[in-house]
Image (cartoon, helix red, strand yellow):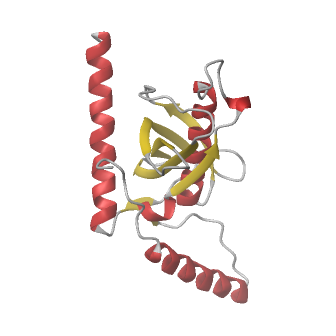
Amino acid sequence: MADEETPPDSSEATESASNEDTESASNENTGSASTASPATATLAESYTEMTEMLLPNDTNNLGRALGGAVLHWMDICGAIAGMRFASRQVVTASMDHVDFIAPIEMGEVVVIEGYVFNTGRTSLDVKVEVRAENPRTGSTRRTTTSYFTFVALDEEGRPTDVPDLESPTAEEAALRERAVEGRREQLREVVDRYDI
């Protein structure tokens, strides 16, 4: 499918994690443990994919996915991406406009993907996309996309700084640019639709 996004290469994320493990071990040896977030993190480090089988409890009387169930999965996926990026607990601050452009039928696999594409001082923006997959044929279709904003919290539950976003590979930079432009386009459509 032409508009499907390929997961970013996680080899750099793995290397980064190994470096963090080494630094953590060094801190333990010197007795100076640190709970601060890293100064930077990559888009690939935040990348999250979840799958759900659409079962009767999450369907309406037509045998299709309840919108509320899909939004719930999107929120969870976005939060996991945010926590992976910030190395902190995050809470949902906002969710942009959502259009359900295709139904998800009972028995299909729901694929939810999310990644951080922008940051503020204590906030991070996450693109979350949902696809329906027929497990028998392998065919997929996009069903909805939205953009979430999360706020990172420290141990006392107060907003805290998040790492700066890095997109060191061409693939990560392209994913980020598509997310930034996709959000702009979605906001333009909402403004036009409601004549704001």
Q: Is residue 88 visible?
A: yes
54 relative to 11, above or below: above
- At 58% from the left and 37% from the top, the residue drawn is 92
Q: Position of residue 71 (x, y in %)?
A: 57, 32
Horizontally, residue 138 falls left or right of residue 73, namely left
Q: Is residue 13 above or below residue 126?
A: below
Q: Residue furthest top?
A: 195
Question: On screen, 145 above or below 163?
Answer: above
Q: Looking at this view, is 33 or 51 the one in front?
A: 51
Residue 54 appears in which quarter of the rendering?
top right
**x, y percent for residue 63:** 63, 25
Nearer to me, 90 or 75: 75
Task: Work out whether residue 144 or residue 90 is closer to the camera in this orientation and state it.
Answer: 144
Image location (x, y in percent) of residue 107 = 63, 39
* Nearer to me, 90 or 36: 90
| Relative horizontal placement of residue 107, taking residue 120 as reference (left or right) | right
Q: Residue at x 61, y 25 (%)?
A: 66
Quadrant in which the C terminus appears: top left
Q: Which residue is located at x 38 percent, y 59 percent? A: 6
> As displayed, is residue 44 above or below residue 94?
below
User: Could you tell me how many numbered marks the image carries?
Assistant: 0
Residue furthest front in the image: 136
Residue 79 as seen in the image, left or right of residue 142 = right
Residue 152 seen in this snapshot:
no
